[in-house]
Amino acid sequence: MELVLGSSSPYRQAQLKTLGYAFNTEAPNIDEAAQRSEAPLELVTRLAGEKARLTAQRNPSAVVIGADQVAVVGTSILGKPLTVARAIEQLSRLSGERVDFLSAICVIEPIGRTHSHVEKTKVSFRDLETETIEQYVSLDQPLDCAGGFRSEGLGVHLVEHVESADPSAIIGLPLIALSKILRTVGIDPLRN
């Protein structure tokens, strides 16, 4: 059965590769802006679903994965900063805070059945000096990561504590839930 990851994220691609999945990728290119009064959970679930649906329309015989992640601090939703200035601004906001990273997946089968899951990872950031933030952004270039933070890189130096039922979720794909869903649809690299 063909598997397609509806994402241009090199981090999500690397995650799937480490688990032995054979897959293709396609960038769904959607508008990731929050809709008016959209709660973080609604936003991340909607974006993962839209990415999966758009990719499934172009790949009707494939099992398709859509994914998205946002960082939530207080009532603020932080997505990808895209620029150095915004990454510095976002990390300054995260300094000394407990932040929830919501990682959503949506899997669509060729028959149209949909499976969704959202994993929350709680990250406690240490108090960060501006110089530390600027150096981190310069070295790690986390411009395409929610909140301007990459846990799998130098970002580990910015945190004091991480709490999650699935340690892979902070990178962008909650692999425990995803592998369970894929097994239910007949994709299991340990059996195929």
Image (cartoon, grey):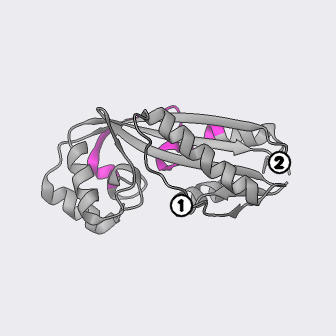
Which residue is label 1 attached to?
Answer: 9
Where residue 31 appears, as percent x and y from the top left, is: 50, 55
On-image quarter of the N terminus? bottom right
- Give the quarter of the image for residue 30: bottom right
Q: Residues within 10 Å of mark 2 (few under 14, many from 20)?
A: some
Using the image as rendered, state which of residue 134 and residue 115 is in the foreground.
Answer: 115
Residue holding disc 2: 110
Q: Do the residues labelled 2 and 1 touch (CB within 8 Å)?
A: no
Where residue 4 sits: x, y (%)?
72, 57
**Mark 2 vs mark 1: in front:** 2
Highlighted magenta segment, given as a residue range:
155-177
Residue at (69% x, 56% y) in the render: 55
Q: Position of residue 6 (x, y in %)?
A: 64, 56
In the shown orientation, is residue 43 left or right of residue 127?
Answer: right
Residue 45 — which label?
Answer: none
Q: Residue at x 43, y 50 (%)?
A: 33
Residue 113 place in picture, x, y as percent: 78, 38
The residue at 25%/50% (across/down) is: 91
Label 2 secondary element: loop
Secondary structure, mark 1, is loop
| Crowdedness near tag 1: few (<14), some (14–19) or many (≥20) residues, C-alpha within 10 Å | some
From the viewer's side, name the closer residue of 48 and 134. Answer: 48
Front position in the image: 178 or 144: 144
Residue 169 in magenta stretch: yes
**Amino acid type assigned to the residue bearing label 1 in the image:** Ser
Q: Is residue 167 visible?
A: no
As drawn, the residue found furthest toward the front would be 36
